[in-house]
Image (cartoon, helix red, strand yellow):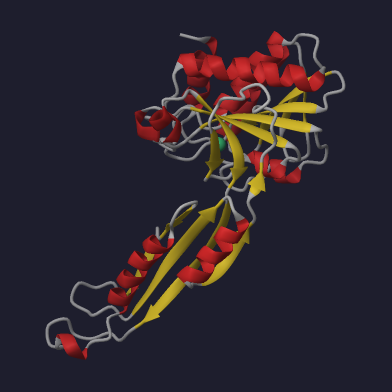
Amino acid sequence: MSRILARLDEIYAIGQHRGAYSAEEDAAHALASSWLREAGLDVTSDEAGNLFGRRGDARVWSGSHLDSVPTAGRFDGALGVVAAIEAAERLPHAPLAVVAFRAEETGPMGSKRLTDRPDAFLEVHIEQGPVLAQLDQPLGVVSAIAGQARGSKVFEGRADHAGTTPMDARADALLEAARFILHVRECAREGTVATVGAIEAEPNATNVVPAKVTVSVDARSADADLLDALVEEIGFDLNWQSDPVPMGDAFAAVLPDAPRLVSGAGHDAMFVPNSSMLFVRSLNGGVSHHPDELSSAEDIALAVDALTDALARLVS
Ligand SMILES: [Zn+2]
């Protein structure tokens, strides 16, 4: 087994769920600190608890996060930190830093609160989707992180007896919500995705016609105009919207033939200036936030090679 896979197992053994600022996340940071020292890096942390292993005047950073969701696998976040340590060891004279940001899954709470900012940040991350596997490619360069729009829509009907109220005399809120859910799916065409992931029905009783239903909407696109048009077409109450974040070309420079991908998920790289991201193929159908999440040792080795090359170009 490669050292990277062994280290990912060690982090996972601390706990599948390493929540924000929990004892488990602390333990993962302590373990990573020992590896950073072994790699000859000076270990510090900032006010937000982000962990750094620095060498010299470190204006180029690489890393990811060590916290995890309750249903997590081994690779999301931890891979980027462990890969960055490997690359730092291969460049023993390069001024650089390896960083483990705090609480990415619930914020992110660490990368948002940076006080020191790098000239460039490189993040290796498992794809968390099936695209690279479908393309039969080990690595993909992230062109942008999608913007997101979130909100909800409320449908008002009238509670009635499910047995005695004729079908043509009902105001069924859930029926209207069901039409809307299909409409959301139809609105999400090329370059966008949209999801209804949560429903609240009232009174939520088997023998009562639904009186009120609230459905969530999550819409995403890497193109700001497409996202605005999608939100407009769906028609819902917007609670929150973020713009797409274009990624830099540090990985494209060393992998000119690798496919370009949009990240539909948020990452620390959104909040660090001059970020570039590299995705590693997800096996098992691209499953993520799940114990079956998997990248192969061979694909990871290629990612570490690319990260090392990209870092070497930036620090020289
Ligand atoms: Zn992650």
Residue placed at 63% from the left, 45% from the top? Answer: 108
Q: Where ligand 1 lies, by image quadrant?
A: top right
- Whether residue 53 is situated above or below residue 290 in the rendered picture: above
In the depicted structure, whether residue 195 falls above or below residue 131 = below
Q: Is residue 73 left or right of residue 225?
A: left
Identify the residue at the far left of this view.
Answer: 163
Residue 31 shows in this picture: no
Q: Image quarter for residue 271? A: top right
Query: Depth check: 200 or 191 in front?
Result: 191
Residue furthest bottom as drawn: 169
Quadrant of residue 163 in the image? bottom left
Whether residue 150 is visible to the viewer of this picture, yes or no, is yes
x, y percent for residue 62: 69, 26
Relative image position of residue 308 (x, y in whole percent): 67, 16
Percent x, y of residue 224: 62, 57
Looking at the picture, tell me which residue is in the foreground, 79 or 245: 245
Query: From this viewpoint, which residue is outermost toward the front?
Result: 257
Q: Is residue 116 above or below residue 250?
A: below
Closer to the camera, 165 or 189?
189
Residue under the image location 39 percent in, 35 percent down: 287
Residue name at image x 12 percent, y 87 percent? 164
Please determine whether, in this image, residue 189 is positioned above or below residue 159.
above
Q: Residue, x 45% and y 73% (percent of image)?
A: 153
